[in-house]
């Protein structure tokens, strides 16, 4: 049909092999399953199928040995593998593309890749959760100031802090699992957009590739990239969680905070200031989240104006989703090691725990337990805090008379809730930072994901 090949510039502009070549394992896997199905329904001879399978395996071997030649005139990894097959098997190789199009082939390969990538990130997230859990044992009785509005608020047990991240990453794992369900649907057999007049067996292919089901509408599935977008969103959220953690730890490792010592092999120095130990891994974890968030935007804009069904624009989904995966995967790998390697600077934290009236809310609740309405108790403790501030003392240093002046029912037991240690012990509610509650949660997490020893 064409009177000439494409202009060289067009060839370079339209190629995708430079980035989709990483789909070779998925492409070969899907092609073998497709060939086996073709043989099962009689569109290929058994012996042809065997030859195709053996040749595809050889091609995979060559790719993995770095002995496979890529050239842009073959556009993408799918054309490369098929062309290599034809070179080996001639007309038998020319039969592989029976009943399929690159449109459903690309979608299938990408679904397989998303599925594999989700499984890998899930492992990484579990590793990171185990790293935080390891910290729970390490820092089991350490108390940290908790913040709201980035002002000192109430005391928090260190394991409560660590399990907070376990919870966030658990939700991310849930989102991955959810996304996996919708990705794990077979597109192969949708052909170009309308299906095929050949007697293919889509259930057969789906089963061979471990898909849960077969996409019911050929037009939908050849245009659908929802699964890519969901995966991109989930990774953007993981990157965001990592970024907030990184930001917190960057602050905690400053001289001003001095809460945390980062492992030196995860930091870098300065070429001019000899004393510097910079938290580059954390900074880049925070910084790289920008790319992952940006990739989600790229994908949303990419698909928003596309008519049905396949459009070449869709080829642009791969650089974005691959980049998100590579970035998040690398961040997670380092995060787990960093979480295990850091150490709380307990003397420095403890020396300043008396600052910021972290026990004020517990004192207010003590008033409430003595029958004072909450709003009045809040007001009274506010007055006590002001008094303590003026005198430059802690709440625990105020004489009993100061408390009784505001609430005559108060006796010396008030001192049992003052100070961060007492305040921590006063908590009782489910999900709170109460020591028994935190211990129960640590146990629950150990049951859930197991323990890690460094
Ligand atoms: N390289 C293309 C991609 O990755 C392959 C799909 C080609 N389909 C087509 N009808 N030109 O999207």
Image: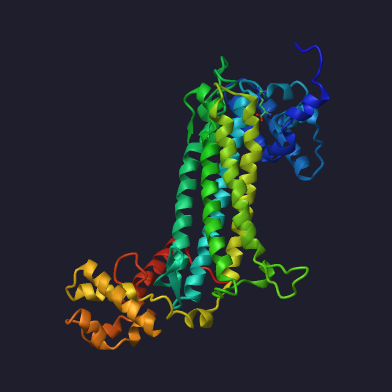
Q: Nearer the viewer, residue 158 or 454?
A: 158
Q: Nearer the viewer, residue 212 or 193?
A: 193
x and y percentages locating residue 294 in the rendered image: 59, 43
Q: Is residue 213 left or right of residue 30?
A: left
Q: In this figure, which colouring scheme has been used for the structure?
A: rainbow
Q: Nearer the viewer, residue 22 or 37?
A: 22
- Would residue 26 be seen by someone viewing this image from the given angle? no
Q: Is residue 203 left or right of residue 157?
A: right
Image quadrant in which you'd find residue 323: top right
Image quadrant in which you'd find residue 247: bottom right
Residue 182 versus residue 336 in the image, above or below: above
x and y percentages locating residue 93 in the rendered image: 73, 25
x and y percentages locating residue 85 in the rendered image: 75, 29
Image quadrant where one finds the C terminus = bottom right
Q: Where does ligand 1 appear, by image quarter? A: top right
Which residue sits furthest front? 390
- Would residue 439 be seen by someone viewing this image from the given angle? yes
Residue 84 versus residue 219 in the image, above or below: below
Q: Residue at x 49, y 83 (%)?
A: 351
Residue 275 versus residue 320 in the image, above or below: below
Image quadrant in which you'd find residue 30: top right
Image quadrant where one finds the N terminus = top right
Q: Residue at x 50, y 42 (%)?
A: 180
Q: Residue at x 73, y 28 (%)?
A: 14
x and y percentages locating residue 199 in the rendered image: 55, 18
Q: How many marks?
A: 0
Q: Is residue 250 left or right of residue 433?
A: right
């Amino acid at each position: 049909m064409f009177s000439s090949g494409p202009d060289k510039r067009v060839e370079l502009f339209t190629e995708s092999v430079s980035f989709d070549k990483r789909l070779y394992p998925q492409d070969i896997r899907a092609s073998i399953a497709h060939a086996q199905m073709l043989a099962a329904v009689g569109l290929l001879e058994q012996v042809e199928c065997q030859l195709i399978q053996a040749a595809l395996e050889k091609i995979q071997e060559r790719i993995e040995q770095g002995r496979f030649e890529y050239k842009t005139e073959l556009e993408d990894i799918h054309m490369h593998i098929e062309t290599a097959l034809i070179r080996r098997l001639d007309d038998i190789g020319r039969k592989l593309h029976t009943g399929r199009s690159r449109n459903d082939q690309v979608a299938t390969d990408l679904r397989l890749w998303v599925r594999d990538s989700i499984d890998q990130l899930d492992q990484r997230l579990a590793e990171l959760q185990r790293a935080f859990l390891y910290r729970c044992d390490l820092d089991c009785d350490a108390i940290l100031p908790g913040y709201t509005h980035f002002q000192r608020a109430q005391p928090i047990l260190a394991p409560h802090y660590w399990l907070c991240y376990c919870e966030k990453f658990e939700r991310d794992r849930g989102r991955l699992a959810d996304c996996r369900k919708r990705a794990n649907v077979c597109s192969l057999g949708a052909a170009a957009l309308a299906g095929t007049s050949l007697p293919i067996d889509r259930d057969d292919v789906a089963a061979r590739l471990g898909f849960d089901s077969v996409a019911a509408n050929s037009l939908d599935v050849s245009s659908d990239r929802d699964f890519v977008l969901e995966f991109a969103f989930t990774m953007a959220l993981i990157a965001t969680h990592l970024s907030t953690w990184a930001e917190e730890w960057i602050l905690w490792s400053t001289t001003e905070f001095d809460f945390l010592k980062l492992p030196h092999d995860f930091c870098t120095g300065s070429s001019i200031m000899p004393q510097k130990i910079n938290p580059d891994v954390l900074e880049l974890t925070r910084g790289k989240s920008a790319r992952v968030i940006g990739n989600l935007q790229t994908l949303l804009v990419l698909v928003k104006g596309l008519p049905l069904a396949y459009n070449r624009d869709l080829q642009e989904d791969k650089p974005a989703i691959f980049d998100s995966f590579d970035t998040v995967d690398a961040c997670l790998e380092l995060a787990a090691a960093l979480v295990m390697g850091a150490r709380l600077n307990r003397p420095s934290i403890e020396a300043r725990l008396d600052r910021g009236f972290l026990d004020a809310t517990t004192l207010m609740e003590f008033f409430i337990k003595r029958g004072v309405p909450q709003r009045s108790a809040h007001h009274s403790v506010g007055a006590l805090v002001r008094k303590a501030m003026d005198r430059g003392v802690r709440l625990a240093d105020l004489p009993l008379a100061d408390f009784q002046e505001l609430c005559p029912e108060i006796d010396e037991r008030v001192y049992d809730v003052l100070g961060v240690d007492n305040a921590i012990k006063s908590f009782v509610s489910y999900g709170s930072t109460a020591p028994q509650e935190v211990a129960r949660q640590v146990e629950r997490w150990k049951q859930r994901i197991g323990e890690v020893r460094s």
